[in-house]
Image: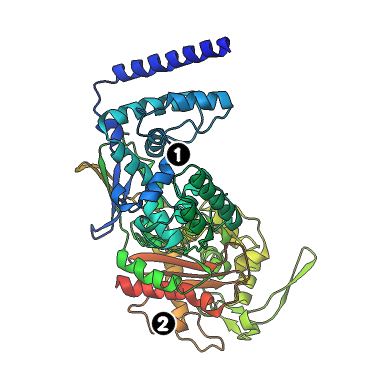
Amino acid sequence: MRIWLKRLLKLSLFFTLLILFLFFIDRKKTIHDISKMNRVEIYDRNNELIYTSFNLHEGNYVSLDEISDITKKIFINEEDKRFYKHNGFDIYRIFKSFFSGSSSGASTITQQYIKNLYLNNKRSYKRKLKELYLSIRLELDYSKKEIFEGYLNTIYFGHNLYGIHDASMYYFGHNPMNLSISEACILRNIIKNPTKYSPILNYENAYIARNALIKELSLKGLITENEAKNALCDQLIIKKMKPKLYQDSILYFKDLVLEELKKYSISNDYNQTIKIYTNYDSLMNKAIMEVINENDEDCAFIAVDKDGYYLSAIGGNNYIESSFNIALNGKRAIASTAKPLLYYDAILHGYGNIKLMSSPTSFKINNKTYTFKNFGSIYENRLITMEEALAVSDNMYALRMQVLLGLNGVSRTLKTFGIEDKESLNQALGTTEMSLKQLLSFYYAFNYDGLKTGFKAIKKIVINNQTKYINHPEYKQVLNKKACNILKSKLSAMFNTYNLIQKPTGTRIKDKLKIKIKGKSGLDDYNSYMIGFTDDYVLGAWTGFKEMKLLTNVNAKIAPKLMVLNAINSLY
């Protein structure tokens, strides 16, 4: 026993001396260096503030007085009983943790708050020492009330929720001042393991853990037996109400902005305001979300201007349910939106004015026979032009063109953008997989003389009222200018009138558009697309299921066209 005590004394002395050493070599720094959180502000194209975060976490900040007393008691009791007695770290808890052999449970609320603000969850001696040091610094200049308040506003509660206000609203539908004993116990358990104790993901686990904590609180005398009895009888009703601080389109967009922000050399000073100016269009995104909110199927939308700045990058229907941005990162078969990629290569090889048959046929390739059909098995049963084929998205014309080009018409265009895909007849009908962002890059080039630009979210960065970065567009010639202009002129076909049996695919929205646009739609069993563009903008929309389920809902199939319709009418 004496050996262990000696070791503990040595360990305590080492930590004390090390922390004192770090404190004195850093004594010239003010508390602002460690206590103030970076404020990030994102502005739209009209210089209107659309998003604010502190230390890269958004949420409604509430004062300690706006949180129920029982909630505060439960968090103090379970997280740090000696919070009001220690000075940032609790040597008693460290010893207790050491003797029990547990690596968790030694961190005070102050240490957890510091970790929430500035550190990560990586376990290392270096991080732990820094955590101890910063905790002491914080306690020297800030009151216990301020620290506890900050802690409750920065805890992660699962489902992309930070802070007790948003967690209370999401799970229970009311402010933290109205949290009951039962609800406070649920929230406290969630922070231990947001997945395991989420009442949405694991209802039974959450229910059992809640009851255990209520009984524990009663035994400790924190609540009366009668209060415990009533709390145990409370039904566990989950509201699942998304905090309405920001609409989903803004949340997906801010992820894009903050990811792009990492590319810039910005100091880690904690007392600064970073203002980021973008081309986000608030009115347009609101109009798009009206369509998205009417669909149960997953939706995505991207819009860029002629300089390649994003106006929108919506990656799903519900950011809190899933922050994965399928528009930027999800690769799906591109359906008939692939046909212009094929026809670009055809124009390049002198086949822009060729007529091909629109009729049922089979193709024999490498001793195998392939049979395809048009949508609805409707054919013109005559020679048609490329414009007519684009108007009705005729499969037979596309397949015959792919054969004429040696089966690699689509592949050659893909390679100009660094995308590799095995040559096949099916490519003409859009079996190639890519993200909506990648697909939009091709149409951007078709629209703007064959140029490619890296799409950007950030236009300008201002730090503490000083302009630090201005993001100028850069272009690269990747496609033939003349071929792109010829193709561009043909891509109004879906909105034109022809003497055809099949209806042009843009008929449904043609007369509702404020201005004339060009574009191409695409539809297969799992995906629906609409790409639209004007001289000023390029827009892309998608609906489907992230889980690759069949797309059967008619309204979902036309939703991409409605998104583009709403966007265009909002922009003009």
In the image, residue 117 lies at what x, y percent?
37, 38
Is 40 situated above or below 421?
above
Q: Earlier in the sequence, mark 1 or mark 2?
A: 1
Q: What label sits on residue 435 in the rendered view?
A: none
In the image, residue 251 lies at what x, y percent?
39, 56
Give the spatial CA distance, label 1 vs label 2. Answer: 61 Å
Q: Residues within 10 Å of mark 1 (few under 14, many from 20)?
A: some
Q: In front of the other: label 1 or label 2?
A: 1
Q: Amino acid at mark 2?
A: Lys
- Provide the residue designation for mark 2: 510
Q: Nearer the viewer, residue 293 or 526?
A: 293
Which quarter of the rendered picture does the N terminus lie within?
A: top right
Which quarter of the rendered picture does the C terminus lie within?
A: bottom left
Q: Secondary structure at mark 1?
A: helix
- Provide the residue designation for mark 1: 79
Q: Residue furthest left?
A: 465
In the image, residue 221 lies at what x, y percent?
46, 44
Q: Is any atom of residue 155 visible in this view? A: no
Q: Nearer the viewer, residue 270 or 485?
A: 270
Q: Is any atom of residue 73 visible in this view? A: yes
Q: Quadrant of residue 108?
A: top left
Q: What residue appears at the point 45 percent right and 25 percent down from the top-left corner? A: 92
Q: Amino acid at mark 1?
A: Glu
Q: Secondary structure at mark 2?
A: helix
